[in-house]
Image (tube, rainbow, N blue to C red):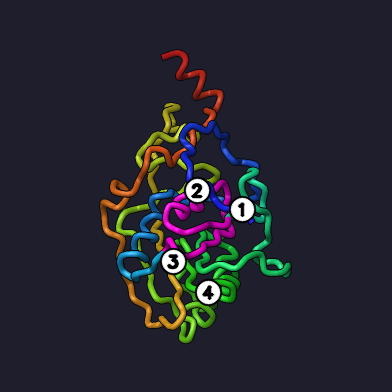
Amino acid sequence: MRGAQNCSTAVMQRRLRDDVPDQLDYFPTPPWATRALCEFLIERCSEPLDMFRAWEPACGEGHMARPLAEYFESVTATDVYRYGDDHGIYDFLGDAPRYCEADWIITNPPYNVGARFVEKALTRARRGVAMFVRSAFTEGESRYPDLFAPPVAPAYVLTFSERVPLLKGRLIRKGAPDPFNLDEDGKPRKVSSATSYAWIVWMPGCHDTRHRWIAPGTFKRLDRPGDYPAYALPLSTAMEGSLL
């Protein structure tokens, strides 16, 4: 097991992760969205997170594990794919023995196997499960009996009032120019999203689902400059910048 380091990624030069297999559905979660969950659990649920252990089983490059480490006593970060040397390799959905004991299991699961992630997590977490998903995840007849109906209904659905932009293979601050997404004039488009996201939280003994909203302004309050990697720019963008 490897604990997540609570460290900045801003000074680390990263490349676009376009090598990740498509089926892994790698869209890094902005750290401020994870902090919003942790603050809700502390303030609204009186959860003493600093006494608990968390497991992030689809950790990618650690963009969720690092903010979790700001709140939890310890964090175990694993993934089925090798993103770097600072996390364990483990197939959370496989038949291998239990990887670790955890009070909370918290992750942004690959969308196409999100339901299986929830089902597995509910058998492994002692205290609670939280999944960052598209808001539409709460829909669907096939998911309802196993995830949303008593006696397994979640305790909370936490809808973000403001958009949480997710980008494939990279993490860039909301509203900042994205050098990997150029407009017709070759200029970077600003990061935005039309997709709504939510946290769904399962807790033992709490199955009367309550819907809460994460208020506007959370991004400004919980965003940190050190959350974002410095990416090596595409050659075309780098060359254009050198001519300015």
In the rendered image, residue 140, in percent from the top left (x then y), is placed at: 49, 74
Mark 1 residue type: Arg
* Quarter the C terminus occupies: top left
Residue extent of the magenta highlight:
49-76
Q: Which residue is mark 1?
A: 2
Tell me the quarter of the picture where residue 234 sits: top right
Tell me the quarter of the picture where residue 43 sits: bottom left
Task: Quote the CA–CA distance across marks 4 and 3.
Answer: 27 Å
Q: In the drawing, what numbered circle is on residue 126?
A: 4
Q: Which residue is mark 3?
A: 136
Marks 2 and 1 close (CB-CB < 8 Å): no
In front here: 150 or 243?
150
The residue that appears at 56% across and 24% down in the rendered structure is 235
Q: Neighbour class for label 3 at 10 Å: few (<14), some, many (≥20)?
A: few
- Label 1: state its secondary structure: loop
Q: Is residue 198 depicted above or below 18 in this figure?
A: below
Mark 2 residue type: His
The residue that appears at 57% across and 53% down in the rendered structure is 3
Q: Earlier in the sequence, mark 4 or mark 1?
A: 1
* Quarter the N terminus occupies: bottom right
Q: Is residue 208 depicted above or below 131 in this figure?
A: below
Tell me the quarter of the picture where residue 190 sits: top left
